[in-house]
Amino acid sequence: MRTTLVSEYRKFFSTRMWRILLLCMVGYMAFLAATFGWSLTFAAGEAADAGAEGEIFSASQLAQTIYGLSATLGYVFPVIVGALAVTGEFRHQTITPTLLAEPRRSVVLLAKFVSSIPIGLVYGIVGTLTTVGAGAGMLALNGNATYLGEPEVLRTVGLSVLAGALWALVGVGLGAALPNQVVSIVLLLVFTQFVEPMVRILATLVDWGATVAQFLPGAAGDALIGASFYAAIGGQEGGDLLPWWQGALILLGYAAVLGLIGRVTTFRKDIT
């Protein structure tokens, strides 16, 4: 296993793609955090000036939502990285020498899962630091408190880092189940950027929809960090989120199920 893990890291760091994705994540999260840091606080201020009854979100909850954007919107990056760990092997035909070096296919797949954890943590750390830096800067620029000393806010920040590792595991499972790189990446982008957001929004229209939507991957990620971007823009309370540990278990479940599908399909076929 140790030799296989070393091989996985060598293959990962021998390409430029991980740096390109990391830089894209930094730019994307800085933009989102600054933009939503301004828009959400501006909207909250307008509602307060208009004398809106009650306060759906407190200022600290808004800060949590902003600081958690790397996990609620930026999770696509660690998922892609995890998927590339498998699909890249099939695209560039390196899977053959990989299996010649380690014929036990379950060990190869397990090594990909294990090696993705620290890589996902790196993406989680970088994405979270970028989001917190840009978001806190915008909050301070608008004359608002950053709430970085609040335990609940710090908890969201810490769990956002953990989310990076869990999403990378989901990516490995996706890549194992769908080894065609183009198909897996396109499907991932379509599902995460269009299908799931629409389903989560439409699910609020029926009583049972919100319960079902809790078990979608993105909703599980929201539950993990305890903050929901979709609840913030919809003016809804975050009470429908599952406990953080249940969100983590759901993400692990997705990774395990996808990985199992990949093991009995992709990694069972003859590979030349």
Image (spheres, rainbow, N blue to C red):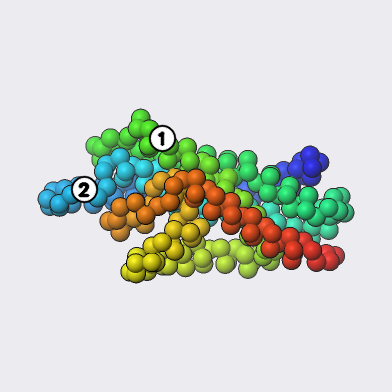
Residue 177 in percent (x, y) is at 67, 63
- In the rendering, which numbered label is found on residue 203? none
Tell me if 172 is positioned left or right of 248 in this view: right
Query: Disc 1 marks which residue?
Result: 154
Dot 1, how many residues are within 10 Å of its Cα: few (below 14), some (14-19), or many (20+)?
some
- In the rendering, which numbered label is found on residue 55? 2
Q: Residue at x 47, y 37 (%)?
A: 158
Out of 88 and 267, give the one closest to the viewer. 267
Q: Amino acid at mark 2?
A: Glu
Quarter of the image with the C terminus in it: bottom right
Tell me if 259 is positioned left or right of 160 in this view: right
Q: Residue at x 80, y 66 (%)?
A: 269
Dot 2, how many residues are within 10 Å of its Cα: few (below 14), some (14-19), or many (20+)?
few
Residue 188 in percent (x, y) is at 56, 63
Judged from the image, the secondary structure of the residue bearing numbered disc 1 is helix
Out of 121 and 138, give the one closest to the viewer. 121
Residue 80 in percent (x, y) is at 59, 55
Q: How many marks?
A: 2
The vertical placement of 38 against 178, above or below, is above
Question: Mark 2 or 1 closer to N-term?
Answer: 2
